[in-house]
């Protein structure tokens, strides 16, 4: 599936971009994060402590265990 991933605040600064468009087979937000950390050093730094992050799936607050089936957008 293709997802738009939005980054806000210090995540955007560490990654160096406001968004990514990714093709993924991730089943959950946590699986997506595991894929994102491999994209760059900035991604790895941004997601080093997920306990300090909030996530939304299709503009609804979510948990890292939230399934991504039929999702279009994930925001951190």
Image (cartoon, rainbow, N blue to C red):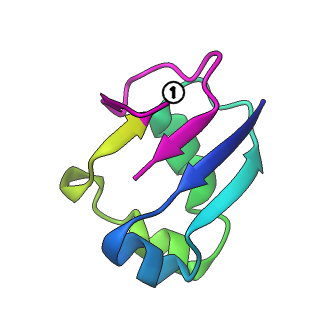
Reply above or below: 19 against 11. above
Query: x%, y% of residue 34?
Result: 54, 48
Dot 1 lies on which element? Answer: loop
- Give me the residue at 45% from left, 74% from top: 12
Residue 29: where, in percent of width, then height?
47, 35
Based on the picture, tell me whether residue 60 belongs to the magenta stretch: yes
Q: Which residue occupies the extreme front position in the image?
A: 59
* x then y, percent, for residue 20: 67, 60
- Quarter of the image for residue 31 reads top right
Horizontal side, residue 55 vs residue 52: left or right = right
Q: Is residue 35 above or below residue 65?
A: below
Residue at 37% across / 25% down in the picture?
A: 65
Which contiguous range is marked in magenta? 57-76
Residue 47: % across, % down: 40, 62
Q: Residue drawn at (59%, 76%), measured in percent from left and top?
A: 17
The residue beneath circle 1 is: 28
């Amino acid at each position: 599936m293709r997802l738009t991933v939005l980054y806000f605040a210090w995540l955007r600064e560490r990654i160096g971009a406001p968004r990514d468009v990714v093709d993924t087979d991730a089943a959950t937000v946590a699986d997506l994060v595991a894929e994102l950390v491999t994209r760059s050093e900035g991604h790895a730094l941004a997601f080093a402590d997920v306990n300090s992050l909030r996530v939304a799936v299709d503009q609804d607050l979510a948990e890292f265990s939230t399934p991504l089936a039929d999702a279009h957008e994930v925001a951190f």
